[in-house]
Image (cartoon, rainbow, N blue to C red):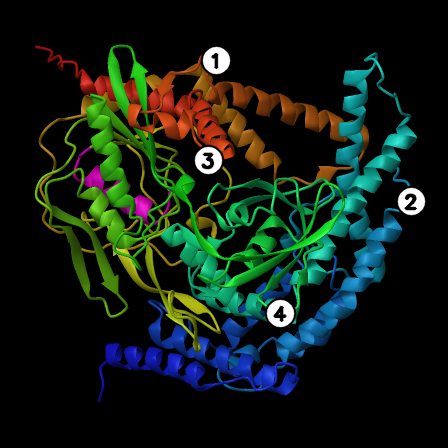
Amino acid sequence: MKSKKGLVLTAIVLFGALFFAFKVIDSGNETINITTKQRLLNAIGSLLEEGHYSPKAINDAFSKEVYKKYLNELDGDKILFTQADINGLKKFETALDDEIHGQPIAFAPAVSAIYDKRLPETIAMYKEILSKPFEFNKDETFFTEGDKLAFAANDAERKDRFRKELKFYALEKFVEFQDQREKNKGTKDFVVKADSTLEREARMKVLKIMDKRYDRLKSTFNEDERFNAYLNVITNLMDPHTDYFPPVEKRAFDEEMSRRFYGIGAQLTETENGEVKIASVQPGGAAWKSGEVAANDIILKVAQGKDEPVDVTGYTTTDAVKLIRGNKGSEVRLTLKKLDGTIKVVTMIREEVSLDEGLVRGAVIQNGDDKIGYIYLPEFYADFERESGSRCSDDVAKEIEKLKKENVKGIVLDIRTNGGGSLYEVVQMVGLFINQGPVVQVRDKDGKSSAINDRRAGAIYDGPLAVMVNEFSASASEIFAAAIQDYKRGIIIGSTSTYGKGTVQKTIPFGKPIDFSSGRTEYGAVKLTFQKYYRINGGSVQLKGVTPDVILPDALEFYKLRERDNASALPWDEISKVPYDTWNNADFSAVVQKENTKIAENKSLNLLKSNLVWLSKNAELPINLNIEKYKEMQKQIRTTVNQNNALLKLDKEMNIEAMTVDHDKFYNNPDKPKGDRYLSWLKAIKTDMHLEETVKMVSDMIHPQPQTVLK
């Protein structure tokens, strides 16, 4: 008899084999299509039950959760379905576990049939509502959190709910137009328009936005995409980080992790009319080499090789990018509308595009007599497919060496809003700052735990270190911050806690390989939670995150955005600690105490904190659609936000410059738009209040004050 681990490995192999052998003969045959989906659903269900770290039982209770969450996913605003629709689907409420276990799929097609019926009705509904003027003097409210509402009892309630939503959007625009009129009154050539004209223009603006939103739904959210969303509901109910990736989404995930992709080398943006436009062309890329693609070209259609082109009307830039990127050496055809109005089809072969803007970058901060290094790490990226691929630990090591040549006396490492990435890379990263030892512990579903160690002797940097975090510093970022804190290697500074993701995932592919260079397969993959990780002191960051040594008020601190705010998150627990030696080169406890005392006594930061609490609570309240009450509330919000922005932004810029070796990248970049973006980043960090506070603290670390002992 096989061990549990052996059974899981066998199951994974079988899932791959199942889809490798399965071939869709006719994609237009609905029975075949349903069979494909059935096999995929069954395989994913089996994988979750056998391989997930802490699987929920796939039973009637689980079925009810899937049923409720999927309907809410499709109709979060509660304006698409009626209660009668939901009642008609009620028979499936406890049958979805049976479908996952092999019964024929019936729920997803039934929902799709209603969706396809309701969508045109909803489009007709908003067009009718927006064809008539709104009355803004009536007292009524709009509740933005649709997931807390019941489905509309009937069509009349559904329409009225949609009317309030559209009225809210129009009210926002109407007040904005009134403000512009007041601000520009008396300006030469400015046309002062009556309220009735502004109200009509506000409705037309909302109509344009809604047309784009629903054009996108019609263009991209077809039955297959809705089924993919259904699969994701199932996987996410195991825990928030177990996801199903269709092939295109899996490619995007791989690109994000490796920081490399194959495309045409062009930046895209959206026009005011909702069209996808070429913003800039990267020198040396496929678009640049063609000589036929230029900034301001409008993309009308995208085709893969000789396939029929896809009309991208209604697409966002994100949607269009998914079509334009692809496999190495493959062909893509763009139908472009040029500035002179001519239409041109341009054929290109996809090439590797550098994502260096998403890599580590550094700068030098002059604080009094102290030179302090600043390193920004957006993600723990790793390209394991190539020996020369980008690795964040290597890149950070290079930044450290560059900073050493600048003679910095301390370093700030910024991992705010860094959502994580490679577990291997974070271990290597910690190793840059400590002299060998355990970095993190991992435990599997059978309860077996082990430590992952940095085995490299010596640290490449042993000076004062501060690590900046916030509520979006997650996963690998939390491992890094926790290790630095446990070793007492540096000071962690940021919001009250990091995100709180203490789980480890791996991807399990389904189907035949479609791109042997990357390992992507025809039916995508599941990113599966199969381990939890723990600090070397035995504690988990799951739910609780990492509590910084020094806490600074943060703009999003009080919003429900962390792991603990997700109902399907796994619980917190702890295991035994592993032996490790703390850093003995310096004791920063006095600096931490001084900084926390200073922050606690800072009236501006206390005001910021109270403002943030008020804003987060206000965001949960219904919005009054009476224009006078709306204006009064908006005035309060605007005043509070402006005050916060002033508190979070320095009046005087810090003295921050690019390193000598990076001078040309910032100031003489041959790709001018890229160079401008680097300079914009440099300008933005110069007024970052959190960074300034961290820099001052590092200066205190550089010049420790002797502790006074009372006798």
Q: Position of residue 178 (x, y in %)?
A: 81, 25
Q: Is residue 138 visible?
A: no
Q: Earlier in the sequence, mark 3 or mark 1?
A: 3
At mark 1, the secondary structure is: loop
Q: Is residue 676 magenta?
A: no
Which of the two discs, 3 and 2, sits closer to the camera?
A: 2
Q: Residue at x 34, y 49 (%)?
A: 381
From the image, tell me which residue sits under label 3: 557
Q: Residue at x 79, y 39 (%)?
A: 170
The magenta segment is: 472-489
Q: Quadrant of residue 153?
A: bottom right
From the image, tell me which residue sits under label 1: 651
Mark 1 to mark 4: distance in Å?
56 Å
Instruction: Please state which of residues 640 and 104 is positioned toward the viewer in this rendering.
Output: 104
From the image, tell me which residue sits under label 4: 307
In the rendered image, the vertical position of residue 658 relative to residue 249, given as above or below: above
**Residue type at mark 4?**
Asp
Q: Earlier in the sequence, mark 1 or mark 2?
A: 2
At mark 2, the secondary structure is: loop
Q: Are marks 1 and 4 in contact (CB under 8 Å)?
A: no
**Residue type at mark 3?**
Glu
User: Which corner quadrant holds the N terminus?
Assistant: bottom left
Mark 2 to mark 4: distance in Å?
43 Å
Left or right: where 320 falls relative to 417: right
* Picture disc at residue 610: none
Mark 3 to mark 2: distance in Å?
41 Å
Mark 1 to mark 2: distance in Å?
47 Å
Q: Earlier in the sequence, mark 4 or mark 3?
A: 4
**Residue type at mark 1?**
Asp
Which of the two discs, 2 and 4, sits closer to the camera?
A: 4
From the image, tell me which residue sits under label 2: 132
